[in-house]
Structures are given as C-alpha cells and as structure tokens.
Amino acid sequence: MSQNEMILEYLEKEGSITQAEAINRFGCYRLGARVWELKQRGHKIIKYTEKGRNRFGLPTRYARYALVHGLQEPQGL
C-alpha cells in the first residue's frame, strides 16, 4: 500500500492528520506533497493552522489537513 493510500484511508477513518502523525504512523516526511497528489486525484482536502507547543514548551503553529465530504464539516477537528 502506498503512502497516498494509507493517508487517504487514515483521513477517511480519522478525519484529519498532522505532519507529526504522518511521520509516526506512516514514515511520511512530506505530507504536503502527498496531500497535493491526493488533491490532484480529486479528493477535497483543506488545511487548518493550529497553535500548540513544541518539545521545548515554546509556542508553535502547524498544519492539520482534513478530508471534506460534500458540504458537511470536516471530521476530527
């Protein structure tokens, strides 16, 4: 199974994913590229920016990608 297939399956099940989740679950270090490829295949995926703290406790921002099903609100946010 390809990274694209694994990420799409995860999005369908969980609703959203971050870069850290993609690295931990699939060894995917280029989530943005995989999302771009999925979008090129017709999947509706949106990006949210979230705020959090890094491992040193400093404020940071990161992207969360969510799969959109029709007009309903994305799952997992």
Image (cartoon, helix red, strand yellow):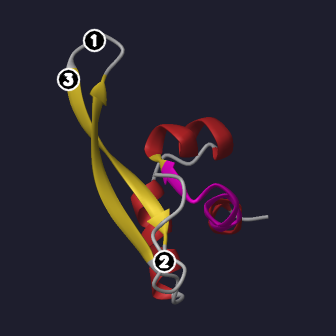
Between 23 and 63, which is closer to the camera in this rendering? 63
* Mark 1 surroundings within 10 Å by alpha-carbon count, few (fewer than 14), some (14 through 19), many (20 or more): few
Q: Is residue 47 above or below residue 23?
A: below
**Type of amino acid at the residue the image marks with label 3:** Pro
Q: Residues within 10 Å of mark 3 (few under 14, many from 20)?
A: few
**Disc 2 target residue:** 72
As drawn, the residue found furthest toward the left would be 59
Q: Is residue 62 left or right of residue 13?
A: left
Secondary structure predominantly adopted by residues drawn in magenta = helix
Q: CA distance from mark 1 to mark 2?
A: 35 Å
Closer mark to the observer between disc 1 and disc 2? 2
Q: Position of residue 42 (x, y in %)?
A: 51, 89
Q: Residue at x 54, y 88 (%)?
A: 41
Left or right, 21 with reference to 30? right
| As drawn, 15 above or below 55 | below
Disc 2 residue type?
A: Gln
Residue beneath the point at 55% across and 80% down: 69
Residue projecting furthest to the top: 56
Label 1 sits on residue: 57
Find out whether the residues at labels 3 and 2 contact each other: C-beta distance under 8 Å.
no
Extent of the magenta region: 8-17
From the image, tell me which residue sits under label 3. Answer: 59
Residue 50 lies in quadrant = top left
Q: CA distance from mark 3 to mark 2?
A: 31 Å
Name above or below for residue 68 compared with residue 16: below
